[in-house]
Image (spheres, helix red, strand yellow):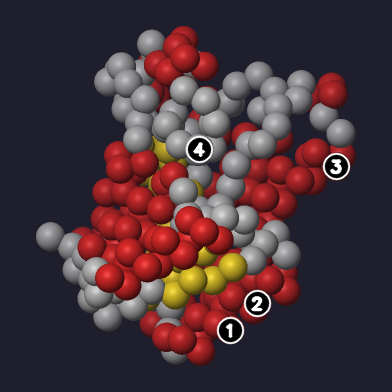
Amino acid sequence: MFTFKGKVVWVTGSVTGIGKEIAMEFAKYGADVVVHNYDNREKAEKIVTELKEQGTNALLVEGNVTNKQDVETIVEQIKEHYGRLDILINNVGGSPFKFSFEDLEEENWDAMINLNLKSTYFVTRAALDLIKEQKGTIINTCSAVVRSGGIIGGSAYTTAKGGVEALTRALAKELASSDIRVNGVSPGLVDTPFHAVNVGEKYPQLIDQIPLKRVGTPKDLVGAFLFLASDYANYITGEIIEVSGGAKLSSN
């Protein structure tokens, strides 16, 4: 169905959750995979070992993608190891805290914007020349909270992900002349370490609003990334695919 043989994919934040599933699936379909780690080297090394045992040319890179120098160093490592980059998946992100807007301090606002939006800017900007050489593709992990407004206390995260979605469309328009496609995947409620709890217990009211009546899993997300990176999507750019079990059908 899909084939990525001979192509190099870099998935930021690929040690747990959605990022790990994306990396493993691309490898399954023949891609060489850049596994990115920030703070869990043991898990990262296990993933890379597993990929290599399967015959994948996997590379472990480490660094904080909110730090420009770290990102530039990673891109140099990719260039030295592969000499190319075909697919970039900006997956790093998160919402490590919640504050009502009136209690949201500048430092917390900046931290959320940096983690979700500025990291996407740093990574894409640093990797752009390599991607241009291959007329590659960029896929950003967005979020369904942009459409719904998110949960109370999540205004900074929702705003940051709104920026990622806007950047996705802006880059799709700007980079089309270089034959680079830019799209996004927008997860709904997904059971990952991002939540650090049983999401079914934490968000029962949200699950009740999902037509498919269940929480998503990382595996539920992977198909959208594979499709958007594949030749089947050669005429698609500037699109955001929501994978949420139909949650938007319940929105007012």
Q: CA distance from mark 2 to mark 1?
A: 6 Å
Name which quarter of the figure residue 71 lies in.
bottom right
Residue 176, position as x, y percentages in the image:
44, 70
Mark 4–mark 2 contact, CB under 8 Å? Answer: no
Residue 32 shows in the view? no
Q: CA distance from mark 4 to mark 1?
A: 30 Å
Which amino acid does the dot numbered 1 rest on? Glu
Along the line of sight, which residue is nearer the eye, 181 or 95?
95
Residue topped by disc 3? 107
Residue at 72% from the left image edge and 69% from the top image edge: 68
Estimate how packed mark 2 is, as few (under 14), some (14 to 19) or many (20 or more) residues with alpha carbons within 10 Å: some
- Does label 4 or label 2 sit earlier along the sequence? 2
Along the line of sight, which residue is nearer the eye, 226 or 74?
74
Along the line of sight, which residue is nearer the eye, 228 or 235?
228
Residue topped by disc 4? 193
Q: Farthest residue in the left direction?
A: 1
Residue topped by disc 1? 76
